[in-house]
Amino acid sequence: MQNSSSGNESSKQNIMASILNNIPTDSGLTKIVYEGPRIALYAKNIEFIMKDTQVISNMVNILKKRIVIRTDESIRLPEKESLKILLQVLSAENGIGEIFFDDALGEARVWVRSTPVSADFNSVNSEFLKKTGWKLVLMRSPGMITIIKEINDILKKGVEERAQFYKLVGEKIFRSKLSETVEASVIALGGFGEIGRSCFLLVTDESKVIFDCGINPYSRDTITAMPRFDILGMKMDDIDAVVISHAHLDHSGFLPALFKYGYSGPVYCSEPTVHLMYVLHRHFIQEAGSQAFYSMNEIEKMILHTIPLTFGSVTDISPDIKITLGNSGHIIGSSVSHIHIGNGDHNLVYSGDLKFGKTYSLDNAVWNFPRVETLIIEGTYGGRQDVFPHRDVADANLIESLNNTIIQGGKILLPVPSVGLPQELILTINQYMTLGKIKRSSILIEKIIAETTSIYDSNIQYLSKGLQSALSQSNENPLRPDNLQTIDSSNLDDQPAVILAPSSMLTGGPSVHYLKQICRYPTNKIIFTSYQMPGTLGKSIQDGSTRQLVENEIFDLQLQIDTINGLSSHNDYNQSLAYISRMKQKLRRVLINHGEKTRVQNLANSVNKILKIQTQYPLVEESVRLV
């Protein structure tokens, strides 16, 4: 085994030498620095920065590392001067909503209502780069820009901290390996044999990486509400990286607390997930008040330490682990992680929450990986009884149920999570109202759903191809129809309406507030469209109990109660088997997580018997050796 510091220096020198041997002498190269999982080349020659993509491509092929070119700080104009030029080169027709000059990356990020076509953008970018030394990055401006502005403010305040952080992360990733042996194990810290607090640790000879870091928001016991980091006997600084599959609190809700307890490393996820985590975590501490176990300070640290990854991009996150994220079909930005260990010694796929079926908002989950020996897949609906009707049948049931109530002048409450299902329902209901199949009425959405919908609106490249086309070509936005209204725990009027509000299981929040307003009238209705956990108010009502204690008050429910299956953003039993079967020829082992014990046990048994693949359902605190 070589000395760690001398090995790291040797590795760095080899990288630098390869770059210097392949870069043109007239590039104006000023420095080569680590930028997290990337290697950044800073140069003064604008022509080289704009045109020499082939040189960079060759270096990437040689080094097998991600390389980016940045403009040297010395050639960038001050922001005020650059802003004047930006407003000259960008047409007012583009509708500028927000501008963020990111000193850490040398990028001017601009959120616009409409983006120029590709040829026009290349021309605008070239002109702006020549005149200012800043690279132009255009983003789609959402209906609500506030979230984007708040995140940009955090990034701006922490620009120096981020630059130093990127360098330190890169040094850890690109250090020499300490050992040539390859061993890897998974330790279940939460979300195995249960739903909530999803979290596991991947341990190799070189690395310790956390995948998901959630809470169980329905548990009142800290030992079952949070991941079991206490069993590991290690410090937060021992963790090399955290990878988040998506923003729902049962997968990301404990992440800010890691920073409170000493974690200072990187977080990897998709860009929409960064934005959604900010919205959901901020809302969580507002609702929790004095019971919150982290603050805005930790949320801001999380934002500063998060490195967004694009789908399909292979990224080194430690000396012996590469990850590639792809669409999981659950909510915007939700990802399946392909995890490459060592020199291809083992390939692990972690599904996160998965949808391998038709939805209007997102494409099917990706599945065609070149290699995968082990799959960790959710089993939320892993019971043999958990078979959804076809989506067309589910839509027909929704149409009938909504019409029956709207025609009578009633209100319909759909308790939903804050993100994912509400956007799918907005698209579905709006589509059928536009076609005249559902009687037109107001669609009322709680403020936090309006905020998360804005993240969909500004990241359309993550949406389904059909929805991307509709958002790009039509003057009418199907995510923001004209009968959509934002409410904020409001008092309802006497008009018929469809109400979308969290929480989905009626464990608190606006959905309970609206239930109390409409529950005494038989013309009104509550429709459950998502999973209801045993022990929650939602599950009790769904099962037919009409006398309920709601926020210390007894209610005799007079409203109609309906459940519509087939709209879930999770796989059903058949979809899970279909997804696994696509990889059957490559798989050696399947691990089932994220589901009640009886359901994950049943799915594991089915995969064993039907697909003949060795399958386990580990429980929390158990470990599985991969290689």
Image: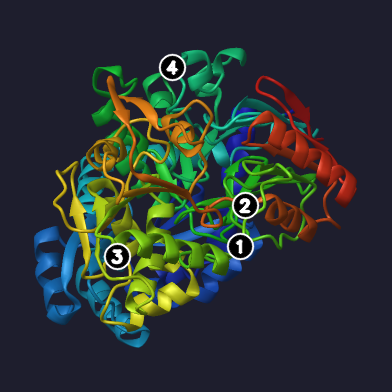
Residue to which mark 3 is pinned: 407
Q: Is residue 566 left or right of residue 252?
A: right
Q: Type of residue at label 1?
A: Gly
Res 357 label: 1
Q: Report how far apart the C-alphas of labels 3 and 1 lie in the structure.
A: 32 Å
Q: Type of residue at label 4?
A: Arg
Q: Position of residue 89 (x, y in %)?
A: 17, 79
Mark closer to the observer (4, 3): 3
Residue to which mark 4 is pinned: 220
Residue 52, compared with residue 190, is above or below; it is: below
Judging from the image, the colouring scheme is rainbow
Looking at marks 4 and 3 on the same chain, the residue that comes earlier in the sequence is marked by 4
Mark closer to the observer (3, 1): 3
Residue 403, compared with residue 486, is above or below; it is: below
Q: Position of residue 420 (x, y in %)?
A: 43, 53
Q: Type of residue at label 3?
A: Ile
